[in-house]
Image: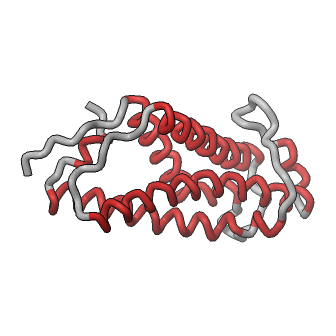
Amino acid sequence: MNFTPQRYTLVAIILHWITALLILYMLIWGEGLIKDQRWLTPPVPAAHADLHASLGLLILFLTIARLVWRVIRPPPPDVPMVEWQAKASHALHWAFYAVLLLIPLTGLADLARTIAGKHPEYASLTFFGLFPVPYFSMPWFGDLHGVLTNLMWALLGLHVAAALMHQFIDKDGLITRMLPR
């Protein structure tokens, strides 16, 4: 194919890759920061819980920044593809945004339950030592945290599979739009 796709802006690329690295870290090691792996229950060192909450809030802030940037600087047009793929791509991206907003928010709701339960010491968590981690009580909402984390794994798998398909099967250069130069 002889099509050269337009690239995302440098800000969009940086926000994407920082968010991606943080998500991978949280998916692979994040639960270990808040659960004692021998017993799968809290408490864990406060620094670990602080890091988990701080990274979750950072992902929330970066996602909001990505959405604001997307409004200010819309993404480049899609590479040529069949209509169902374009619709699936857009649905996948918006599902990512929704989950990237909801996982941290449900985590804050779950934190309220943990504080009200057996671990009031978690009320003193801070965002990288800068300010207290906010939390709110909505127990049913906190229950969604684990479900949404599993959904993130599925979305991530689809996203990577689609990117690899575009790179190695369609050979349309789509993946280069989000790679740093």
Please name the residue shown 49% across and 65% down the image: 153
Q: Quarter of the image holding residue 102? A: bottom right
Asked whether 98 or 73 is in front, the reply is 73
Q: How is the image coloured?
A: secondary structure
For the C terminus, give its image quadrant. Answer: top left
Tell me residue 75's x, y (percent): 38, 40
Tell me residue 82's x, y (percent): 24, 64
Above or below for 69 versus 146: above
Above or below for 24 versus 124: below
Q: Quarter of the image holding residue 158? A: bottom left
Please name the residue shown 77% across and 38% down the image: 126
Please name the residue shown 88% across and 49% down the image: 121
Is residue 62 shown left or right of residue 48? left
Q: Quarter of the image holding residue 37? A: bottom right
Is residue 15 shown left or right of residue 1? right
Is residue 26 shown left or right of residue 161? right
Q: Farthest residue in the left direction?
A: 2
Above or below for 180 versus 79: above
Asked whether 135 or 171 is in front, the reply is 171
Tell me residue 68's x, y (percent): 55, 36
Please name the residue shown 69% across and 68% down the image: 144
Is residue 32 shown left or right of residue 169? right
Tell me residue 157's x, y (percent): 40, 65
Q: State how many labels appear.
A: 0
